[in-house]
Amino acid sequence: MHIYNVTINIDESVHQNWLEWMQNEHIPAMLATGKFTKALMSRVLVEEEMGGITYSVQYTTDSKATLERYYTENASELRAQSKPFEGKFVAFRTELEVITEQ
């Protein structure tokens, strides 16, 4: 099992609109690709020097191969949908391999 983690710092001026978009549009669209089995959105409880509010969204997938298919088939289109928030967020992505779950 793999986790595709996206950490986002969003400017407070668009925070509420972005949060609603994430919950009602973006995360459902990610899941609708059929490449992820679930998504967990968490608020990061640390204050950033640059300000803003930070979130981590973890999308669970069955394999590295499925994640690679997401990059090839869906990533560009789904990332482009964040255009209304352009310049108001910073994001970085991390791939995680699950070793054990207890």
Image (cartoon, helix red, strand yellow):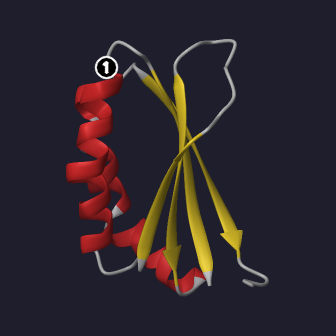
Q: Residues within 10 Å of mark 1 (few under 14, many from 20)?
A: some
Q: Say left or right for 58 vs 87.
A: right
Q: Residue at x 53, y 87 (%)?
A: 62
Rendered position, 33 above or below 100: above
Rendered position, 50 above or below 42: above
Percent x, y for residue 71?
44, 66
Residue flagged by tag 1: what amino acid is it? Val
Q: Where is residue 96, by image quadrant?
A: bottom right
Which residue is at the front of the view, 74 or 94?
94
Judged from this view, the residue extending furthest toward the right is 99
Percent x, y for residue 81?
24, 44
Percent x, y for residue 53?
52, 25
Number of residue marks: 1
Which residue is at the front of the view, 78 or 19?
19
Quadrant that contains the N terminus:
bottom right
Q: Residue at x 31, y 20 (%)?
A: 14
Percent x, y for residue 21?
24, 41
Which residue is identified by label 1?
14
Q: Say left or right for 67 vs 80.
A: right
Q: Residue at x 71, y 78 (%)?
A: 98
Rendered position, 2 above or below 14: below
Q: Residue at x 54, y 85 (%)?
A: 65
Q: Say left or right for 102 vs 93.
A: right
Q: Say left or right for 99 vs 75.
A: right
- Callout 1: SS: loop
Quadrant that contains the C terminus:
bottom right
Which residue is at the front of the view, 38 or 91?
38
Rendered position, 76 above or below 51: below
